[in-house]
Each structure stands twice: as C-alpha cells, then as structure tokens.
C-alpha cells in the first residue's frame, strides 16, 4: 500500500508524551552551556513563579495539602514510585523511581547536569510568597531518586520548632 | 520534576527567557541546537525509510500528544501531509488564563523539522497562518517527485 491516512481526535488518546522530558533536559543543558548555571536557576524560577502561580496561591490558602494533591496527580499520571508523608507543617515526597530520569535513561536521552534543578529550583519558587519553603534533601543524579521536603518557614531544617 | 504534561508552558517560557537574554537570534540558535541534538529519531527514521519515516515518527508523537489531526502518506506521489485541526501544544497554551504564550511559539516547528528534512532530500512547507487558533498544516515532498 502506498497511500495511507490516519485521523485522530484529541479524546482518542491520553496526553502523555514522555519524550518531552528529554526535550526539557536538552533545554536545560543548552542554557547551562551558553549562559551558565545561574541562568538555569533563573529560568526555572521565572517559569515556576509564572506557571505555578495558581498552585502557589492554593498553598498559601490551603497549606501543604494543596501540594500533596498536586504532586500525587503528577506522579499518578507519570507512573513514578513515590511515598508521601504529610503533617500540618511538613510534606515529604520520597521518590524511589523518578519517571523523568527513568524514561530518559531508557531512551538514551542525555540527562542535563543540572536536571535536579527542575525539582529543587522549581519547588523553592513555588513557595515564594507563602509561609513555606522547600529543600531537596537527597538526590541521586543517576536515577532521580530523592527526597523533597516542603516545610513551614518557622521550623528549622531538622523539622523541629 | 516538571511533568511532561507541563513541558509546553516550560518550553514557551524558555523561548521568552532566551529572547530576553539575546533577542530572537538566541531563540533561533536554540531551535537549531534542538533540531541537531534532539531529533535524531526523526532523522534516522527518514534516512532508513524515506517519507514513511515521517509517517512513523509523527504517528508516535502525535498520538502521545493527543493531537487532533489527519495525516496522509502518498509514497507514489512522494508526499506526506499533516493537517493539524487542533495542535495540542498551542491549544494548551491558549487555554492557560494566567500565562501568555511566547509570541512566535509555533515557528519552532518551521525551524526544527526543516533543518532535519531538507538535507535528506525533501522539501518542507508549513502553513502557520492559522496557528493562533491552534491549527496548521505541513507538507513534506520528495525533492525529485515533480521531476520528469
């Protein structure tokens, strides 16, 4: 057959194009090479403060449960292995299998040297203007496995008042 | 982690960031870089399978992106065509109430694919005149298909 046609409606498929992780990684690496590591963080902060503005507002109004709901949705969609621990003042997200890094490694896409900032810088930026902050406690560059922590600012780094 | 479902706004913001650093030239250079480093799968598909490689490549990406499209491959006529009825990327950007898309967002499709396909012996044409409504069309023609 030399002539073929394919037609699809948007509702025929789920929106999940994992190769976009590789494209984002390529963008991060390009910024790093051309403009330096501060530019990577500046770009991610700019993106996060703009795109996640509704999430930041929800965090301010509803507290950490808003973040838990959001991140559960993300990891449910992408199929990561993740454990959530939520209290009034702290949310811990333990990622044992990162969907982004797992996909890039399996497809042979290079993982940007500063790819961790897509978690670290973004999480911090989401918290700007709220009583909360974020830190990336552990991160494995090879697998993306790590522990993310969101906490109320009055608490010190160890989580005690 | 930025979800792959949120990549398009991140991409659009990256174009804005680059333009703020180095003007439109900086955005163009990035698109060329991305074409050279990230579209190896399109390049190898077309090298191995000719026009059918376009069919194989976009069958994968457009289905995963839940696009609303019609795609036609006519190997005898040497032509591959996509009519994008609703581009999933631009549609997503237009749906966002709180984020403005990069002003020349759709033109990355002009630069990225032309740069892969033309050196492989294909003509590439894209009509972006209605891309502000998330519609466009692209045609890839075997460069020798009109010759006697």
Image (cartoon, coloured by chain):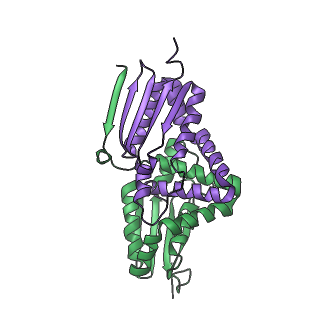
Chain colours: A green, B purple
Spot the residue most to the front.
Answer: B129
Q: Quadrant of residue A64?
A: bottom left
Q: How many marks?
A: 0
The reply to whether residue B107 is visible in this rendering is: yes
The N terminus of chain A lies in which quarter of the figure?
Answer: top left
Q: In the image shown, does B35 or A76 lie closer to the viewer? A: B35
Measuring from the top left, give residue B41's x and y in whole percent. 52, 35
Residue A146's spot in the image, x, y percent?
A: 51, 63
Observer-nearest of B103 and A149: B103
Q: Compared with residue B128, is residue A124 higher up or lower down, i.e. above or below?
A: below
Q: Quadrant of residue B55?
A: top left
Q: Relative to residue B137, is residue A116 drawn left or right?
A: right
Q: Is residue A122 left or right of residue B82?
A: right
The residue positioned 53% from the left and 18% from the top of the image is: B144
Name the residue: 50% across, 29% down: B45
In the picture provided, is B24 more to the left or to the right than B45?
A: right
Q: Left or right: where does residue A127 sit relative to residue A114? A: left
Q: Position of residue B148 (x, y in %)?
A: 51, 11
Q: Is residue A98 visible?
A: no
Q: What residue occupies the far top of the structure in this picture?
A: B148
Front residue of this view, candidates A32 and B117: B117
| Quadrant of res A117 | bottom right
- Residue at image position (56%, 80%) is A157
Q: Position of residue B106 (x, y in %)?
A: 50, 47
**Picture layout, residue B138 above or below residue A55:** above
């Amino acid at each position: 057959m030399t002539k073929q046609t394919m037609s699809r409606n948007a509702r025929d498929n789920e929106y999940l194009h994992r190769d976009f992780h590789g494209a984002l990684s390529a963008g991060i690496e390009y910024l790093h090479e051309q403009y330096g590591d501060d530019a990577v963080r500046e770009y991610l902060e700019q993106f996060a403060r703009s795109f996640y503005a509704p999430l930041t507002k929800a965090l301010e109004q509803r507290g950490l449960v808003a973040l838990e709901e959001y991140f559960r949705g993300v990891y449910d969609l992408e199929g990561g292995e993740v454990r959530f621990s939520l209290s009034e003042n702290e949310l811990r997200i333990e990622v044992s299998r990162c969907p982004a890094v797992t996909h890039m490694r399996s497809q042979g896409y290079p993982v940007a040297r500063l790819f961790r900032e897509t978690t670290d810088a973004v999480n911090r930026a989401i918290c700007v203007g709220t009583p909360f902050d974020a830190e990336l406690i552990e991160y494995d560059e090879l697998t993306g496995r790590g522990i993310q922590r969101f906490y109320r600012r009055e608490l010190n780094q160890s989580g005690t008042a | 982690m930025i979800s792959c479902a949120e990549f398009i706004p991140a991409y659009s913001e990256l174009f804005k960031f680059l333009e703020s650093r180095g003007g439109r030239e900086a955005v163009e250079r990035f698109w060329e870089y991305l074409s050279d480093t990230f579209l190896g799968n399109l390049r190898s598909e077309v090298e191995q399978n000719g026009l059918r490689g376009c069919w194989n490549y976009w069958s994968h990406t457009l289905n995963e992106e839940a696009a609303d499209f019609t795609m036609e491959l006519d190997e005898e006529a040497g032509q591959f065509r996509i009519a994008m009825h609703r581009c999933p990327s631009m549609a997503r950007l237009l749906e966002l109430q709180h984020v403005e898309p990069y002003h020349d967002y759709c033109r990355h499709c002009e630069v990225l694919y032309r740069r892969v396909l033309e050196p492989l012996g294909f003509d590439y044409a894209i009509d972006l005149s209605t891309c502000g409504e998330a519609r466009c069309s692209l045609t890839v023609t075997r460069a020798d298909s009109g010759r006697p």
